[in-house]
Image (cartoon, grey):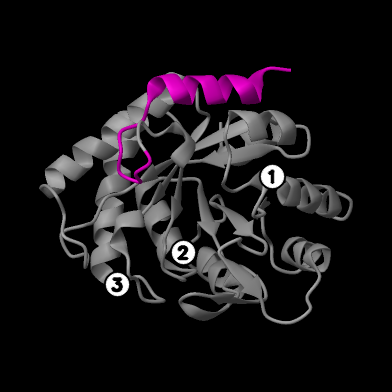
Amino acid sequence: MSTLALLGKGRCSIGVIHIPPFPTSFRRPKGSFEELLDYCERCARRLEEAGFDALLLQNVGDEPTHLAAPPETVAYMTLVGDRVRKAVSLPLGISLLNHDGKSPLAIAKAIGADFVRLKTYVGVMVKMTGLLNGCYYEAVKYRREIQAENIALFADIFDREGQPLGAVDLVEMAHFAEYSCMADALILTGRSKEETSQMLQAVAEKVSLPLIVGGGVNAGSAGILKSLCKGFIIGAAVKEQADDFSEISTEKATRLVASIKLP
């Protein structure tokens, strides 16, 4: 079953695999690329064992990044994705730190992933990396060019890592992403669970797409927010330690999934 179909059923849990630095990253890898692949496979297997519904790969160790993903990033992400895809039976998604509407789709197409996460989909966001313009047109056009309409576009609206440029209304942006920009699901994440709750309630009245909480999720906040959304993207909360590249704690992951699934 696709991730989009799972979202339709509600209470979908998407576990993030934070990929360590590649051999070509500015940060020095701590081990070989084969060890990186082994780590990502372990993470995937533990998340599947804990009951997660889907996985999301992100090149967290690749900072600092340029706007468009370079060929080596696409190549390494494809190798990681292929390894994870063969290791588990869960549907898989791709997210890049790069602001690039094409590369995530190219990787997803190559490995058989079924969704991509695009963090600045509509509008203009002011981030620490500068001004980013929405990539919706590039993504929608390229998806059609490579005949990948089966790959869903999960679009962040007002990513919490930045601020929208100008007085732009959240609900209007969400409506625009659905009706004019062909998003398949919307990701909303505030700087607190209260802000996230307010965002979800406001947008739910105006759009029909599945709403996903994109970060800052733990067992407590998931229990509060699960009635307002269709799914959660979960990363740091299931780590053994407070480190992007720590191992996944099966115990923490199982407990968090249970908090989402239970009535």
Residue type at the position of mark 2: Ile
Question: Do tag 1 and tag 2 residues touch (Cβ < 8 Å)?
Answer: no
Rendered location of residue 78, percent (x, y): 30, 53
**Number of residues whose C-alpha sits closer than 10 Å to that of mark 2, classed few (under 14), some (14–19) or many (20 or more):** few
Q: Nearer the viewer, mark 3 or mark 1?
A: 1
Residue 212 drawn above or below residue 1 = below
Res. 146 mark:
2
Please tell me whether residue 243 belongs to the stretch shown in magenta.
yes
Find the distance from the CA under tag 1 to the CA under tag 2. Answer: 38 Å
Q: Earlier in the sequence, mark 1 or mark 2?
A: 2
Residue at disc 3, secondary structure = loop
Rendered location of residue 94, percent (x, y): 44, 52
Find the distance from the CA under tag 2 to the CA under tag 3. Answer: 19 Å
State whether residue 55 appears in this view. no
**Residue for point 62% across, 58% down:** 155
Q: Nearer the viewer, mark 2 or mark 3?
A: 3
Q: Nearer the viewer, mark 1 or mark 2?
A: 1
192 on left or right of 105: right
**Residue for point 35% across, 31% down:** 240
Residue 218 drawn above or below residue 132 = above
Residue type at the position of mark 3: Pro
**Which region is colored magenta?**
242-263
Residue type at the position of mark 1: Lys
Task: Give the residue at mark 3.
Answer: 70
Quadrant in the rendering for residue 239: top left
